[in-house]
Image (cartoon, rainbow, N blue to C red):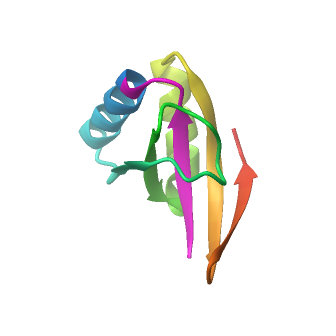
Amino acid sequence: MKYLIISFNSRNSVMTFAKLARKNGLYTNIINTPRSVSVSCGLSIRTEFRNLQFIISLLQKSNLPGLIGVFSVIRKGQYEEVEKFY
């Protein structure tokens, strides 16, 4: 299973971006940040990998502070393979 994690260093930025994404018709979940992704405020946004280009475009337009990154996560059983895209 492959998905995206968008990580910020503040909960406010996470909540703001999640709301913005939903306003633009994007399904997202607010989750606890996986340790394999990064150290952050503890919350991140999870969405489908196919939304990568739209997410990057939305991040560039919104110019929210505190972005740590956009990560691709591939789950392989108990293990996660993480790659930073943006």
Q: Is residue 84 left or right of residue 22?
A: right
Task: Tell me: residue 41, above or below residue 46.
Answer: above
User: Which is more toward the observer, 62 or 64?
Assistant: 64
Q: Count up the numbered dots.
A: 0
Dominant secondary-structure state across the stretch colored magenta: strand
For residue 74, above or below residue 29:
below
Q: Looking at the image, which residue is at 45% across and 21% down?
A: 62
Task: State which quadrant residue 40 falls in.
Answer: top right
> Which residue occupies 62% across, 79% down?
78
Q: Quadrant of residue 76?
A: bottom right
Task: Please name the residue shown 50% across and 54% down the image.
Answer: 51
Residue 5 position (above or below residue 48):
above
Quarter of the picture containing the C terminus is top right
- 29 and 36: which is toward the camera: 36
x then y, percent, for residue 71 = 64, 49
Q: Residue 67 at x, y = what percent?
A: 57, 26
The x and y percentages for residue 80 are 67, 68
How far across and down, in percent of the image, does residue 24 sit? 31, 39
Chain part drawn in magenta:
1-11
